[in-house]
Image (tube, rainbow, N blue to C red):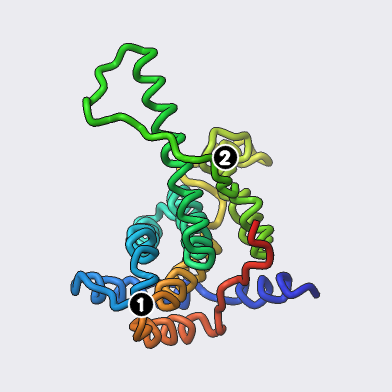
Amino acid sequence: MEPDAQATARLNEVTNDQARGAITALVDAFGQLAETGRLAVNPDKEHLVQSVFGWWAWITRSSKLVLLAHDAGLGHEAAPNVRSILEHTLVMQWVADLGDEAMAAVGAKADESSRKLFNDLRDQHWSIPEDFNPSKSPTQAMLDFSSLCTAYGAHNFYIAYRMLSAHIHPTAQGAAVHVDRTTDVLHSHATRSADADLVLVAVCVIHAALTINSLAVEQPLTEAITLARNHIGHNIERPVLHNRT
């Protein structure tokens, strides 16, 4: 077996309750840390933390939302949140690993998006706030998610991302989960099991916590990460950046 295949086989054995325990442990740890409003970091890392903290908040709070959706029988409908959690997790690690170079790329992409919106608003004669005047940043490559997964050797992440995409965009696969193709019976709920999504979310919140810990001086999330790993039953580690370009 390839290493990715071995890891997948192990994670396939993780139960919903195990994944839920891991997610809850790190949601609680985030809440406790966020209440302080501070995170002790080395001075040269402070600007990175300010850039990625909001993503960590999004990942963690969205993970809680996914749990609530599963409790309400809406696990499948939480697929957009799961894909967003996955994407945010790896981009967040990329910024932490690459530092200013990655931050510049993220900023340039945001500026480009703002300029396009500004042009569309102007062309359609919408009112534009006076303070909305997008700057033009130097061109900087922002890796697409496929390239980012390749750079980290995280091929399973991209497979999961693509599978989730089929239930986010209007696709034939997305429509098919509400129809029994054998009997043509229509279902109000999706026939696709979303159990694996919870395990993926658990892995992501562990990765995200490890990223924050890597930037912090006292690594305040170590205990919660250990607890989450114990719930999962595996020593989950982040992927390693192999290609910086």
Picture quarter with the N terminus: bottom right
Residue at x 50%, y 49% (from the top left corner) = 105
Whether 180 is drawn above or below 31: the answer is above
Residue 20 in the image, given as x and y percentages of width and height: 41, 72
Whether 234 is drawn above or below 65: the answer is below
Picture quarter with the C terminus: bottom right
Residue type at mark 1?
Answer: Asn
Disc 2 target residue: 174
Relative horizontal placement of residue 113, taking residue 11 as reference (left or right): left
Residue occupying the far right of the picture: 1
Residue occupying the far left of the picture: 36
Q: Observer-nearest residue: 63 or 57?
A: 57
Element carrying mark 1: loop
Disc 1 target residue: 42
Tell me, yes or no, whether the two marked residues, 2 and 1, touch with CB atoms within 8 Å: no
In space, the residues marked 2 and 1 are separated at their CA atoms by 46 Å
Residue 130 in the image, given as x and y percentages of width and height: 22, 25
Relative horizontal placement of residue 129, taking residue 231 as reference (left or right): left
| Number of on-image labels | 2
Q: Nearer the viewer, mark 2 or mark 1?
A: 1
Relative horizontal placement of residue 6, taking residue 18 as reference (left or right): right
Task: Classify 10 Å Cα crowding around label 1: few (below 14), some (14-19), many (20 and above).
Answer: few
Q: Observer-nearest residue: 70 or 120?
A: 120
Whether 12 is drawn above or below 233: the answer is above
Whether 148 is drawn above or below 22: the answer is above
Q: Observer-nearest residue: 122 or 83?
A: 122
Q: Is residue 78 visible?
A: yes
Q: Is residue 195 visible?
A: no
Residue type at mark 2?
Answer: Gly
Residue at x 35%, y 19% (from the top left corner) = 121
Task: Classify 10 Å Cα crowding around label 2: few (below 14), some (14-19), many (20 and above).
Answer: some
